[in-house]
Amino acid sequence: LLAAGTLLCSAQEFRGGLAGRVEDASGARIPGAQITVTARASSVSRHLQSDKNGEFRFDTLAPGAYTLAVTAAGFKPAASDVNVAVSTVAAVTVKLTPAQATQSVTVTAEASSITTQTVNPTSAIHQGVVTAQDLSTIPLAGRSFANIAYLVPGTEPVEPSDPTKARISAVSFGGSSGLNVAQTVDGGDNSDDYIGGFLQNFSPDAMQAFAVQTAEENASTGHTTAGSVIVTTKRGSDSWHGLFAAYGRTAALNARFPIDNPAPNPKQPFSRQNFVGVLGGPIQAKRLWFFASLEYVNENASIAYSAPNQTQFQALASLARQGLIPGVGNIPVTSSVPVPFHDLLGNLRLDWTQSDRSQWFFRVANDSYLTHNDLVQQGTLASTGATSHSNYESAVLSQDYTFSPTWLGTFVADASLLHHTEARNQQLGFALAFPFSATASTISGFETFGDNQFVTPITAFPVLRNQEKYDLRYDVSHYGGEHAPRFGVDFIHEPVLGGALSGTAENLTVFALNPSDYLQNQTQFTADLNCAPNATPGTTCTNTPAGDGSFSQNVQRLGLYAQDAWHATERLTVNYGVRYDTTFGLFQASGRTQAANPAVLTAEALKLGNIFTGTPHDYRRAIAPRLGLAYAMGRNSTTVLRAGAGLFYDDLAQNGWVTALQAVNQPPAPCQAPGDSGCLPGAAQGGAGAIIDPDYHTPYAIHITAGVEHAFTPNWTASADWTHEQGDHAYRRYQYQSGFTLASPLTASDTASQQALVPNLNVFRTDNRSSYDALMLHLQGNLARHFNLTANYTLSSAKTWGCVLGELFDYVNGVCNPLHAFAPGDYGPSGEDERNRVVLAGTYHGPEGLEVSTETQLESARPFTITTPVDVNGAGDSIDDRAVINGVQTTLDEFRGTPYMQVDLRVARPFTFERWGAHFTANPFVEMFNLFNHNNPGANYVTNLAALPTPVNNLNNATAFCLNADCSQTAPITNLNQLKVPAGALGDFFGPGTTVGIPFAAQLGIRLTF
């Protein structure tokens, strides 16, 4: 008899393992038993003996199905089928009885799934394992594995924080933005080191499984302060197998969203097709295999313009026809803008068994996509769009080598490349931005017409990206008796980490009024366009001269770790370890340190020592201890108590301070005293610079966890877990304005004197703090041939310091007033703070072979901040401050949007048949996303007082709404909820490619497998 469970993380995260004990009928251990585990797909076997305690352990097994066979002198042989999952070690107990006949039992009666996971008797890690079964049966809104990662407690949907790679999956962990997550694919690093988050995308049909770890990861896991996603791809076998799939959606299958595309306007055009081909099999049976997959996406989406926005566009076009916009006599206005998207994802893998002791695999993958009219949003014209083109390539070479039955080594070599370009639709040399377009749906920019500046109030986005990364890793694990020690080294060489921000000459006018207002007062439009002395308050003009927008780095990262799983007693397992990480060249660019930064030299010449002293250096004290405890209770270990604590370090993504890296592109000229050729000019002459604070500390998070898991029956389990994450040394940007918050003792203290000599300075510091607390409840039910179900509820709170937007471990956190960086009102919920989240997923097996699967997500509203374009904080900057209502300034993320509900449903009816000596399964299906057509604007509300459809009487202190043009008639603001106005249909997510945040959409498809 063999019983299965789940153990601690495996010896190599993208592999799995098998561990257990051999007993007789009385429970006495049997040492010296011969144990063989054989991969059913390839017939590759490994052998060992049970130790003196009757225990055994196999590490670094590829995820999949295996046969476990056990023999011992005087006992019946026993054999069973077992499944090994990624990043876990299956725990088994083998009971032998004395006799001669062979005994065979089957433990797993159905394909493994996130809905069929067993109790973890010896692990403190919070994780879920998503399998190929899940990826092929549960509806995927964007054909992205992240859609199912959301099923794991502690995760939530989040928009990709870089709109130039909006189709790359993003998952939020611990109330964060999703940028502080580590991802590996087949053991190779797949992280974006410029913006953070995931890098290359993979077809779901190329994935065998992946583990989503949300807390208390092993010491082998680094480069994350939140969680990790560990992906392993499919491999060939001795049996030929393949897949062809086609998916189709059209506008006729989508509902109309009245905010963006109201009747009687023509319905927003849309169509999308996905075509998938997969083939795997033997090149040489039992020795060499291949697996290949190809997916092509052909999407013809569009951005529809709402009636209010079209009114503003028409007013702007009328201003152009009257010659009020120099060089532009005509502005086309259409009801929608096409956004075609084409994507090709390829994957090829070879597996080779060199010997019983050595197994290799080699995998190459590519993702190439092209988007036209990229970055166009619901409130912006097509001129602001761009053509986006990305090529991602990666290769992994790996070997598992068995030194002895108890010593194992795993080698991984990984290479990855990215080349991305953004080309503007037009090159006019200027851009115009109006309040109606400055909403949450324009995160990629706030220009209404003209050149896309690739700059937002939050950050700047690159027009060129290049990343070339090489990763070498070696892990050694040992199993002997009560301990399972493991140690390893991970070295990343990144000779190319660079690109460019826009370097062309740019003129940006941000108007305080909308085009329809200027149509009634054309003289005022001309004054505001040129920021004349009589310009409307709140209007700003920014002239950026041509320059070198490029940045180039050569960065190395080193990680060392050691850990052990100590089976202290039969019921208590202690997992402990320590990790050390450091970087080389993090603050160097173009071969120069920040000592060559003109802003640094100027600040020293101006004696601004109160702002900073010195230059930053790579951090060398990132030592991270980790501890986990698991105690199994009950006769059959049906109840498990677990707890843990750990420290996790993760360097900032480089985009946060890219302007400081650009500053050293050229050798510095002399700057010993103000006015020298190498010094920055004063702010009055446009002088500005960026400095990285020398007291850099790698950001870290402390994880503290506790929980209990119980199996009521073999088919029903439940768990309750609590997590606390304390974040320290996260990034903030201090924006010092000459004459207001920045002064030099070398000149008079008045504003004019200071601005004549002192430039404006951005200082990047790592002093932010945050916290995340969550209670996660999980219920899982599984009735063979009827249904399986997973249900999660998360009660959480995520808080941080910020100015107008708060993120945990993100680049966006700002400071409203650098002289009062931790002022009242600057601490509040993060942008991904969800107090309540419910997820339901599973499959019902109905009569006549009917299968109904669902992924349902319910969330409480996410927060947002309402700002004002005037400087109410008195910091002298042009950055939006939080709005003041009835004399009281609002706080960070004080407002809440709309609760979110999305029910995705898939109905399928598989058919099986025999042809040409092969077994085929045809599975036609229909998928329905947002089944009940729930309005999901999320936190996508108007976030600026000047952009409200009904104007307020005073942008400095709003007390009433204006009911007529001259505001002689008003209605008082008596409740903050009166300021909440949905901004559009995009929800919290970018662009037309997502189905989260848009109305009902249906998709037809068929999958043919053999």
Image: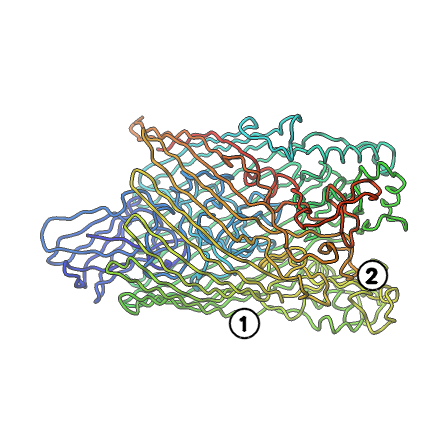
Residue at image point 56% right, 39% down: 994
Disc 1, SS:
loop
x%, y% of residue 522? 88, 38
Q: Foreground: 881 or 392? A: 881
x%, y% of residue 724? 49, 63
Q: Foreground: 821 or 941? A: 941
Residue at image point 74% right, 43% down: 447
Residue underneath mark 2: 683
Residue underneath mark 1: 621
Residue at image point 53% right, 42% down: 367
x%, y% of residue 240? 34, 36
- Number of labels in the image equals 2
How has the structure been colored for display?
Answer: rainbow
Image position of 46 (left or right of 387): left
For residue 452, the mark is none
The numbered mark, 1 or 2, whose residue comes first in the sequence reads: 1
> Mark 1: few, some, or many residues within 10 Å (few <14, many ≥20)?
few
> Mark 2: few, some, or many residues within 10 Å (few <14, many ≥20)?
many
